[in-house]
């Protein structure tokens, strides 16, 4: 497979065409952004760390019967994925209160939620990714009712699988963000990335963060945190 024309440049990844039908080439960038792009930095090797972790997680989810866009890892910072049309809705699942739910609703950080909380955000940088409901999704025709139901079901299933995986690595899966897309057959697939840029992971014993909060809150080295996640995944799942 060879890399073709650049299709899309996001904050963390670049997507290219390939000569293979319905196959895209994803290159993970070393850039770090937080607060909808307000805080920016570069961290050499960060793209590779996220690509490696995303590859582990997508492969694990595929093996567990969750449909994802992931095909294979082709280098440390690149993967091949199935072509999908991204639904412009960010699906967030929370197990423990942290981040925006605390500032938005005054819920105390670290509060363990009785059941996983699902939230939708409209993926729109200029509007600052606002919180929306299923009614807004319907009104704005961002997805069909059936797709919303499928996204909910898949997000909760993924939460169960990943919560258990990370707990085995002595990490609490606090919350995470998912994006879904529709492939050329009309099938809904998990897309984008699943990495410490898009999850909160806390060490079970120390409570230390191994995710992008290290950057958001200037709490320590992103690379050290992400490498620790890779080492724990490697110990459990083998070489990627
Ligand atoms: O900021 P907030 O607390 O709403 O984030 C919830 C989860 O979703 C966090 O794990 C965060 O990393 C992730 N997220 C993301 N991309 C966004 C917003 C949130 O990956 N645009």
Image (cartoon, grey):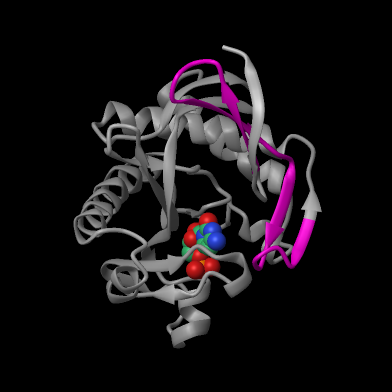
Residue 176 at x, y percent in the picture = 44, 56
Q: Nearer the viewer, residue 199 or 238?
A: 199
How many numbered tags mark residues here? 0
Q: Nearer the viewer, residue 122 or 210?
A: 122
Residue that lies at the very extreme toward the top in this rendered image: 1
**Residue 159 image offset from top left, x and y in percent:** 31, 51
Q: Residue at x 26, y 48 (%)?
A: 154
User: Does residue 214 appear to the left or right of 110 in the view shown?
Assistant: right
Tell me the quarter of the picture where residue 49 sits: top right
Answer above or below: position of 154 versus 104: above
Q: Is residue 24 magenta?
A: yes
Q: Tell me the magenta residue range.
A: 13-40
Residue depicted at 25% across the width and 57% down the height: 152
Q: From this viewpoint, is residue 203 visible? A: yes
Against 71, residue 232 (above or below) is below
77, above or below 35, in the image: above
Q: Is residue 44 left or right of residue 140?
A: right
Q: Position of residue 30 (x, y in %)?
A: 74, 41
User: From what the image shows, is residue 99 above or below residue 86?
Assistant: below
Q: Would you identify the image quadrant in which residue 148 lies?
A: bottom left
Is residue 207 visible to the viewer in this orientation of the structure? Answer: no
Picture quarter with the N terminus: top right
Front-most of residues 199 and 153: 153
Residue nearest the observer in this picture, 206 or 107: 107
Residue sitting at the far bottom? 106
* Residue 52 image point, x, y percent: 57, 30
* Left or right: 53, with 6 as reference point: left
Q: Is residue 86 magenta?
A: no
Residue found at x 28% / y 75%: 135
């Amino acid at each position: 497979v060879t890399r073709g024309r650049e299709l899309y440049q996001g904050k963390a990844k670049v997507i290219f065409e390939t000569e293979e039908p319905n196959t895209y080439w994803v290159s993970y960038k070393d850039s770090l952004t937080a607060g909808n792009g307000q805080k920016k930095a570069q961290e050499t090797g960060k793209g590779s760390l996220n690509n490696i972790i995303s590859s582990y997680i997508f492969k694990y989810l595929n093996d567990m019967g969750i449909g994802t866009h992931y095909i294979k890892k082709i280098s440390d910072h690149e993967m091949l994925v199935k072509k999908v049309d991204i639904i412009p809705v960010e699906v967030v699942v929370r197990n423990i209160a942290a981040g925006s739910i605390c500032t938005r609703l005054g819920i105390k950080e670290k509060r363990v939620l009785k059941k996983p909380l699902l939230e939708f955000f409209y993926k729109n940088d200029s509007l600052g990714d606002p919180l929306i409901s299923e009614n807004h999704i319907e009104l704005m025709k961002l997805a069909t009712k059936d797709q919303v139901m499928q996204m909910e079901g898949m997000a909760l299933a993924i939460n169960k699988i990943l919560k258990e995986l990370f707990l085995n690595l002595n990490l609490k899966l606090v919350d995470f963000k998912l994006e879904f897309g529709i492939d050329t057959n009309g099938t809904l697939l998990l897309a984008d990335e699943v990495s410490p840029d898009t999850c909160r992971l806390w060490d079970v014993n120390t409570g230390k963060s191994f995710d992008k909060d290290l950057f958001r809150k200037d709490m320590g080295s992103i690379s050290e945190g992400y490498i620790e996640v890779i080492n724990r995944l490697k110990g459990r799942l083998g070489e990627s």
